[in-house]
Image (cartoon, rainbow, N blue to C red):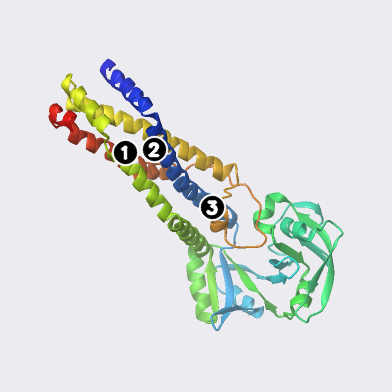
């Protein structure tokens, strides 16, 4: 043990003698780890956030499709669907999008139908809104400088402008769901969008047995071929694929820079200078074994890669969970005028850490040890002469 500790001590002193080279490698290596860990941590955090939000989503949603596009669905479809064995309530939902030219953002407008509404906390005001009133999200209120009792104009499908009174504003805690949301009464929704009384945006289908969701969806498609049943599993799978695609896109964008950094770090680690070759020759001449020199280079590579890995990983963790992921968040969130403001819950996936370590630390240590092995097995006189 004393021998190994002495070799470690010598490795540390050797790194300190070449401190500028060592610090350069650590800086480049840390930047690589920081970039990779930031993207991986942010992608996984978004996935976890989406899974938590969608955990309360309906098991089955039915939409009507016309010419490959979503269309309003007749309300009487729900009565026929409710006759399918295993189906409970069928709740029509009324929602759509409204473009606000003053802010350049798209708002999600929803009718407070009553049944099946999720209870949402308010910052102030009341819920549900009465006729002529709306409840807005925090992002809408901030972009339009609204407060409780303010008026917000909304132009309907007929070109007429309706002025609604803000009856309430959602809290920051619900901003992931409500940031760009406007909720109004069902009567006002039909008046603004001219949807008529017998059509809904989609239908929420309650299935008593979760294992029968796919069978119910198949039966709905057989009864109404112009519909598209969407299960919760399909939504979760879509979000999972979406974030994987976006993280891959970001990694591709930084691929050239990362490759240049990797080549630089590899070159610095793999290339032995004349001074280092001379040092290995002297150590061999004074009695060091090849295994001792390999252990020395192992400790040098281990210390350098470990410091770089921890520095980059901690930097990526702080960047994502304490500084709002300001570098990569816009690319992974999407492109929108009104972003929901929310803090991701700190979490570190051990599997990702291990994979990142094997992709970065192990190749670096291999690049450090292999050239030293070639020099260590060569005659000391030949090594010292170059």
Distance in Å between CA atoms under marks 1 and 3: 29 Å
Name the residue rendered at 51%, 77% in the picture.
221
- On screen, residue 199 above or below 331: below
Using a 10 Å C-alpha cutoff, classify the residue at mark 1 as few (fewer than 14 neighbours), some (14 to 19) or many (20 or more).
Answer: many
Q: Earlier in the sequence, mark 1 or mark 2?
A: 2
Residue labelled with disc 2:
25
Give the structural element (helix, strand or loop) at label 2.
helix
Distance in Å between CA atoms under marks 2 and 3: 24 Å
Quadrant of the image occupied by residue 280: top left
Residue labelled with disc 3:
328
Which percent across, then down, holds residue 273?
27, 35
Position of the C terminus, as image quadrant, is: top left
Q: Is residue 58 left or right of residue 153?
A: left
Q: Are marks 1 and 2 in contact (CB under 8 Å)?
A: yes
Q: Is residue 105 left or right of residue 17?
A: right
Name the residue rendered at 74%, 60% in the picture.
140
Which percent across, then down, holds residue 348?
49, 41
Name the residue rendered at 69%, 49% in the picture.
173
Residue labelled with disc 1:
269
């Amino acid at each position: 043990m004393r021998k190994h500790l002495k070799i470690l001590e010598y490795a540390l002193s050797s790194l300190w003698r070449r401190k500028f080279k060592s610090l350069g490698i650590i800086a480049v290596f840390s930047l690589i780890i920081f970039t990779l860990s930031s993207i991986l941590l942010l992608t996984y955090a978004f996935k976890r956030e989406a899974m938590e939000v969608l955990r309360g989503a309906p098991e089955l949603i039915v939409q009507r499709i016309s010419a490959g596009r979503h269309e309003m669905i007749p309300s009487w479809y729900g009565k026929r669907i409710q006759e399918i064995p295993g189906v409970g309530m069928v709740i029509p939902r009324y929602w759509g999008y409204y473009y606000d030219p003053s802010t350049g953002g798209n708002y999600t407008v929803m009718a407070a139908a009553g049944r099946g509404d999720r209870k949402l906390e308010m910052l102030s005001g009341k819920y549900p809104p009465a006729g002529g009133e709306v409840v807005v999200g925090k992002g809408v209120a901030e972009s339009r400088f609204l407060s409780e009792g303010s008026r917000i104009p909304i132009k309907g499908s007929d070109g007429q402008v309706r002025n609604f009174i803000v009856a309430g504003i959602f809290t920051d805690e619900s901003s992931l769901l409500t940031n760009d949301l406007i909720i109004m009464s069902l009567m006002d929704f039909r008046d603004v969008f001219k949807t008529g009384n017998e059509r809904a945006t989609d239908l929420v289908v309650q299935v008593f047995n979760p294992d029968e969701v796919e069978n119910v969806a198949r039966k709905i498609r057989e009864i109404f071929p112009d519909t598209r049943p969407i299960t919760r599993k399909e939504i979760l799978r879509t979000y999972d694929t979406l974030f994987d695609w976006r993280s891959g896109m970001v990694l591709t964008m930084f691929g050239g820079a990362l490759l240049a950094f990797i080549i630089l770090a590899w070159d610095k680690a793999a290339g032995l200078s004349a001074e280092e070759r001379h040092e290995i020759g002297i150590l061999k001449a004074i009695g060091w074994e090849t295994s001792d020199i390999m252990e020395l280079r192992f400790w040098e590579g281990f210390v350098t890669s470990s410091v770089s890995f921890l520095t980059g990983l901690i930097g990526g963790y702080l960047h994502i969970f304490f500084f709002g992921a300001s570098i990569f968040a816009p690319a992974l969130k999407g492109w929108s005028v009104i972003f929901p403001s929310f803090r991701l819950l700190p979490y570190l996936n051990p599997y990702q850490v291990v994979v990142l370590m094997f992709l970065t630390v192990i190749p670096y240590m291999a690049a450090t040890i292999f050239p030293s092995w070639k020099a260590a097995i060569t005659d000391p006189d030949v090594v010292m002469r170059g």
